[in-house]
Image (spheres, helix red, strand yellow):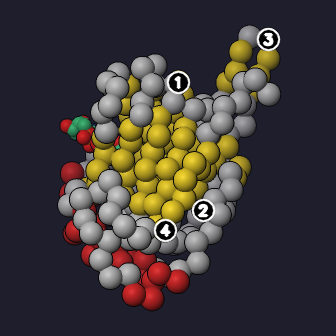
Amino acid sequence: DPGRGTSGIEKSIPVSGKGSCQAEPGDTGDEQDAVLEDYETIEGSEEIRGKKRKMNIQLMEFPRHMDEYGSLVPIEASDSVPFDIKRVYYIYGVEKGVRRGFHSHADLEQVLICVSGHVRILVKTPWEEQEIFLDDPQKGLYIGPMVWREMFDFSGDAVLLVLAGDHYKVEDYIRDYNKYEQIARQYFTENQ
Ligand code: T46
């Protein structure tokens, strides 16, 4: 299918050394034995809803209406994504070599869709990190609460569209990696 890209998880590695984030991995203790799931692309939002996992991410695939006039991908709040969309923003015009993000959200749920070009997303928890390549307007990367993210390797034509489950709230951002690790360990322990 020439219309489809190759979006997907490129690397999935348990966190065992210093990554691109600022902190030492710390003592992982028994969490090292955490079973990590494979993240298959899914359709719709049902499989995400209500789950709290140690890697709060999911690749999603949206249906596409394609005809001789081109392609159209509809996204319905609560149906296509597992939350009501309260905000939409998009990131574009990112210069070569620029890396953005470097934070987690305490509560916010989002879906990232690269509607033009390509971008790589690093998602990371205290237990695991994954690099996800987005280059397909039909694919969305759901990122739940308490996941560290960095966006990089934007192509010149990249437009990263983000659907967010809440309004912009500065207080929801966790920008200090050490603080993030501490809060994340507690969060995932309490929500298993
Ligand atoms: C995220 C990743 C994927 C606003 O005024 N309203 C908004 O809704 C947003 C998202 C940002 N801003 C302002 C705040 C900053 O002055 O826009 C500026 C750039 O935002 P920031 O540095 O947070 O951008 P990124 O690329 O680091 O992160 C953004 C989102 O903020 C974040 O929620 O998950 O994209």
- Please name the residue that numbered disc 2 is placed on: 48
Q: Mark 4 near ligand 1 (CB under 8 Å)?
A: no
Circle 2: residue type:
Ile
- Please name the residue that numbered disc 4 is placed on: 14
Q: Is residue 47 above or below residue 87?
A: below
In the figure, is residue 46 to the left or right of 134?
A: right
Q: Quadrant of ligand 1?
A: top left
Q: Are marks 4 and 3 in contact (CB under 8 Å)?
A: no
Q: Secondary structure at mark 2?
A: loop
Q: Mark 3 near ligand 1 (CB under 8 Å)?
A: no
In the figure, is residue 122 to the left or right of 37?
A: left
Circle 1: residue type:
Ser
CA gap between label 1 and label 4 equals 30 Å
In the figure, is residue 9 to the left or right of 24?
A: right
- Please name the residue that numbered disc 1 is placed on: 116
**Few, some or many residues within 10 Å of mark 2 (<14, 14–19, 20+):** some
Q: Nearer the viewer, mark 4 or mark 3?
A: 4
- Please name the residue that numbered disc 3 is placed on: 68
Q: Is residue 97 visible?
A: yes
Q: Mark 2 near ligand 1 (CB under 8 Å)?
A: no
Q: Secondary structure at mark 4?
A: strand
